Every structure is written in structure tokens, then in C-alpha cells.
Image (spheres, rainbow, N blue to C red):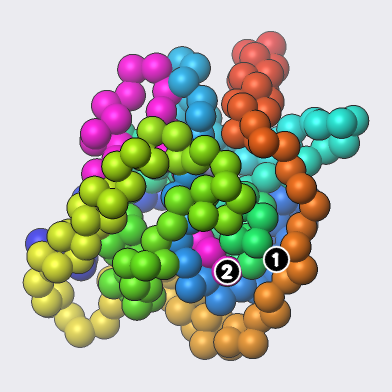
Amino acid sequence: MNRNELGKSLNLSVELIAKGRPNRSGRPILPTYITIHNTSNDGPGADAAAHSRFVRNKGYYEWNGKKRFVSWHYSVDDKQIIKHLPINEHAIHAGLGNGQSIAIEICMHKGIDQSSANSRAARLVAALMNDLGIARDKIVPHKHWTNKTCPVLLLPSFGTFIEDAESVLASLTASPTESLARDGVVSVEEFAILDQTQDAPVEAAPEDDPEDAHKQIANALAEFLATEGD
Ligand SMILES: [Zn+2]
């Protein structure tokens, strides 16, 4: 498989959070890490499409009487990947990881083919490693930044997940053209902007978020889906 074929195998579409929304600051980052999450949402229907609608149309949960905004770059399920932010923009997902990492949320809803979702995520990681030159020691679980138990399903075998991504990367054959695949994993514009964000500041430590942030998001998403049905 070459890089172009890898891109096609992802079934990736782009549904960006609108500029100006509170969970899209537009602040530039130079992504040197990839942070892996599980949604911790095992409810029915909590797939990539639902997470895309949630992060674009709501994008927060309420905690201690305050809105806590959240965002990430890619939602992955067993059928598709949806991208919500340019990879050179700040997302709100992992404390100090926000300023330097690309966030991938892997779904785990009722009825999902989990191994298919995991291998789709590993292929996305391989594409990003290829396109951005990110090394294996920079593929980290959410736990790396905050000590939270996330990604809850993958943590016990996180090394195997990285090995899966590495073996996809190692198996890539040369693409028919020399240029990187421009399939939306990393867009032409993002490649251009990445060259200009070398001096992106490392941000100060953000406010603490709750230990069970993913559960809070899962509850907010369930409320959001119920509202959609009205
Ligand atoms: Zn997480």
C-alpha cells in the first residue's frame, strides 16, 4: 500500500468546527505529539458522526456551574474518520498536551467493531507519522499528560497499538508521485502554515479539568443527541 492508498482506506471527511466558536481558538500550534483518547462513551449511537455534530454544534459540558469547552482533531469509528480542526490549531483535550499535540478520539459505542476502529486509528496515526515525521515515542495516551485513565480501552495494550501504526508506516511503498498525499489528513494549507508556526509558544498549564471529563462529555453528548431528536 502506498500513501495515497492509505489515505483512501481511512474514509476521511472534513467537518471543521466553525471559526470563532469557543472551542476553536485558532491559536497556532506546532504539533510534535499525537494524543490518543477513547471517548469513554459506550452509549448507542455515540459514533464519529455524533461526535462531529456535538463538537461543532455544542462542544462543551457543564461542570461546577461553568461551561467547559472541548475539542479534538479527529473522531474515528469503525466506518469513517471525521476531522474537526486543522492539525496546526490548538484543541482542548489534554491539559499541557493541548499546545503541542494532535488529538484523536476513538469511539467505543454500543455495536461498534472495536478492532476495526482501532486499526483505522492506527492507519491514521501512520499517515500522520509519515506526513509530519512524528516519531513513535511521541504517540502518547491521554494519560501521559494528565494521568487520567484514557484511552480506557487501549491503555492495557498501548504498545501494540503503536506497533500496529509502525507496521503500517513501515509497509508503505512509494507513492506514484513524489509529493505527499493531499487527501485531507494534512491539507495543503496546513502544510504551508506549519512552516510558519515554528515559534508557537508553549502555553501555561491550563485549569484543572475533572477526573471524569470523558464521562462528562459522554453525558453532554447524550443530552445533545436527545435535543436533536426534538
Ligand atoms: Zn482522553
In the picture provided, is 215 more to the left or to the right than 126?
Answer: right
- Mark 2 is on which residue type? Gln
The residue positioned 64% from the left and 87% from the top of the image is: 199
Please rate how many residues cluster around mark 2, counting C-alpha atoms within 10 Å: few if below 14, some from 14 to 19, many from 20.
Answer: many
Q: Is mark 1 within 8 Å of ligand 1?
A: no
| Viewport quadrant of the C terminus | top right
Q: Is residue 107 above or below residue 222?
A: below
Horizontal relation, residue 51 to residue 207: left or right: left
Q: Quadrant of residue 216?
A: top right
In this view, 104 is above or below 135:
above
Q: Nearer the viewer, residue 187 or 173?
A: 173
- Quadrant where the N terminus is found in the figure: bottom left
The Cα–Cα distance between marks 1 and 2, rounded to whole angstroms, is 14 Å
* Marks 1 and 2, the one that precedes in the sequence: 1
Depth check: give the residue in front, 199 or 192. 199
Over which residues does the magenta segment extend?
100-120
The numbered dot on residue 100 is 2
Residue displayed at 67% across by 36% down? 211
Residue 148 appears anywhere in the view: yes
At x 48% / y 73%, what residue is drawn? 32
- Is residue 168 highlighted in magenta? no
Residues under numbered marks 1 and 2 in contact, where contact means CB atoms less than 8 Å apart: no
* Coordinates of residue 61 in the picture (x, y in percent): 74, 33
Mark 1 sits on what residue? 26
Under circle 2, the secondary element is loop
Furthest residue in direction right, as rendered: 65
Q: Quadrant of ligand 1?
A: top right
Question: Residue 60 placed where, x, y %?
Answer: 73, 37
Instruction: Identify the element where label 1 is drawn.
Output: loop
Q: In terms of image quadrants, where is residue 198?
A: bottom right
